[in-house]
Amino acid sequence: MERKPKRRTRERILETSLVLFNEFGEPNVTTQLISDELGISPGNLYYHFRSKDEIIETVFADFVRDIDATLGAPELRIPDVEDLWLFLHLLFENIWRYRFLYRDLNELLSRNRTLEMQFKRIMAHKVKTAALICDGLVAADSMRASKAEIQTLAVNMVVLATYWLSFEFVRDARRTIDGEALGRGAYQAMALVAPYMSGDARAWFQELSKAYLTS
């Protein structure tokens, strides 16, 4: 049986940093903690990354790559109900994978201009994709909404998704946020859209949203 090659130290540093940032919050994670978790010396870590900020920027670059891959509306056909569901589903999956960015968003952006400008672009891209999908649903007679309503709806979906983790934290600051919390967020985002849906599309969209409800 062929043995898998060992992961490079640089990759392990990034993976471990993401886990620690997500678990404890970025401000509470030091390079010493990352080194201890990996069982390597601080010098070995600094050989690959000169500072914690450089680790953050590299993790953020991975986030940008992943989120950009999810923000493409269908180009060769009219979007359907499942396209909107998939957009929201993948959006919340990405938020969960990089949840420290959303939980510590203001802190991170206030001290890093590069992250600030990139996140601003990503937010605009999210709104644009949501609006394009909704435009397609209107064209397919699956949704009834004006251009102004679609733009407002797209913004509201993105705002809800971006700050859902903060809302969950305020609800119960002593409880660990889990994947179910993101499911509740996805359900709420879909609930914003449902009143604009029509006919069979609305029934199917509501059926899809039920998957995020826990008993």
Image (cartoon, grey):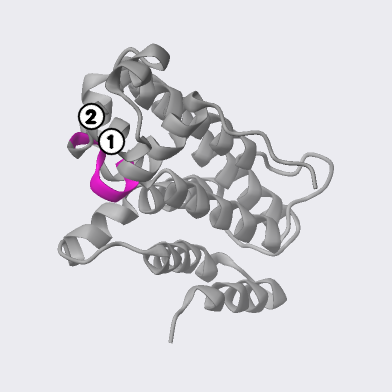
Magenta residues (range): 21-27
**Gap between marks 2 and 1 measured at Cα:** 6 Å
Residue 152 versus residue 147: which sits nearer the camera? 152
Q: Secondary structure at mark 1?
A: helix
For the point 78% across and 50% down, the residue is 78
Q: Is residue 52 left or right of residue 195?
A: left
Q: Quadrant of the C terminus?
A: bottom left
For the point 66% across and 34% down, the residue is 5
Label 1: which residue?
36
Residue 50 seen:
yes
Label 2: which residue?
32
Q: Main secondary structure of the magenta part?
A: helix
In the rendered image, which quarter is residue 76 located in? top right
Which mark, residue 96?
none
Residue 38 versus residue 59: which sits nearer the camera? 38
Question: Looking at the picture, how far across and down is residue 152, in whole percent?
Answer: 44, 48
Question: Looking at the picture, how far across and down is residue 87, in whole percent?
Answer: 60, 52
* Residue 71 lies within the magenta run: no
Crowd band around label 2 with a 10 angstrom C-alpha radius: few (<14), some (14–19), many (20+): some
Amino acid carrying label 2: it is Gln
Q: Secondary structure at mark 2?
A: helix
Residue 152 seen:
no
